[in-house]
Amino acid sequence: MRTSHYLCLAAAALVLVALPVRLCAAEEAAAKPKQFIYVLRLVPRLYDDQNWTKDDTAALDRHFARFKHAIETGELILAGRTRETGDKTFGIAVFQAPDEAAAKQFMESDPAVVAGLMTAELHPFAVALERKNP
């Protein structure tokens, strides 16, 4: 055989060896949870603290307990709210989910959303930099 035939055989062998590696990398990327953010806004009725009912407060407690649980399981990356009042206040939840449908289900099952205290809007998200926790 000539040298060119050996080179062709070697190239074909490399492709066959590299193909499973590329497929595995693609499968890993597909299986890796995706990140999302949802923005929470209070309904106008709750801008005034005097309008909060016991049921509203109980739903907010369930909302916070759910976030604490999601932090413990690693699903929730971070959550917080602005310190502004009225229509300027909003909260965010940055979390991971297998896909957009699961992310939407996570958002829509938030006790504050279910109880009608807050509206929520979902967005795909990617954390680019993150400070390490001490």
Image: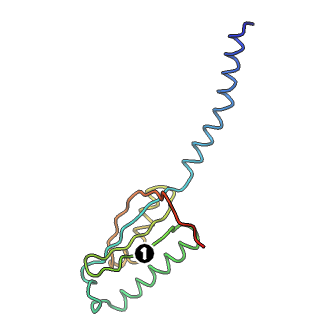
Q: Secondary structure at mark 1?
A: strand
Is residue 27 toward the left or the right of residue 5 in the image?
Answer: left
The picture places residue 89, in percent across and down from the top left corner, at 31, 77
Q: Quadrant of the N terminus?
A: top right
Instruction: Say which of 21 and 57 sits in front.
Output: 21
Identify the residue at horizontal 68%, vertical 10% (top origin).
4
Q: Quadrant of the C terminus?
A: bottom right
Tell me which colouring the rendered structure shows. rainbow
Q: Quadrant of residue 117?
A: bottom left
Identify the residue at horizontal 37%, vertical 92% (top origin).
54
Residue designated by label 1:
80
Does 119 sit above or below residue 125? below
Does 57 sit above or below residue 11? below
Is residue 83 toward the left or the right of residue 21 in the image?
Answer: left
Identify the residue at horizontal 65%, vertical 38% (top origin).
21
Q: Amino acid at mark 1?
A: Gly
Q: Residues within 10 Å of mark 1 (few under 14, many from 20)?
A: few
The picture places residue 30, in percent across and down from the top left corner, at 54, 48
Instruction: Say which of 110 and 50 sits in front.
Output: 50
Label count reads 1
The picture places residue 11, in percent across and down from the top left corner, at 66, 21
Does 115 sit above or below residue 98? below
Which residue is farthest right? 1
Is residue 79 toward the left or the right of residue 48 in the image?
Answer: right
The picture places residue 70, in percent across and down from the top left corner, at 53, 72
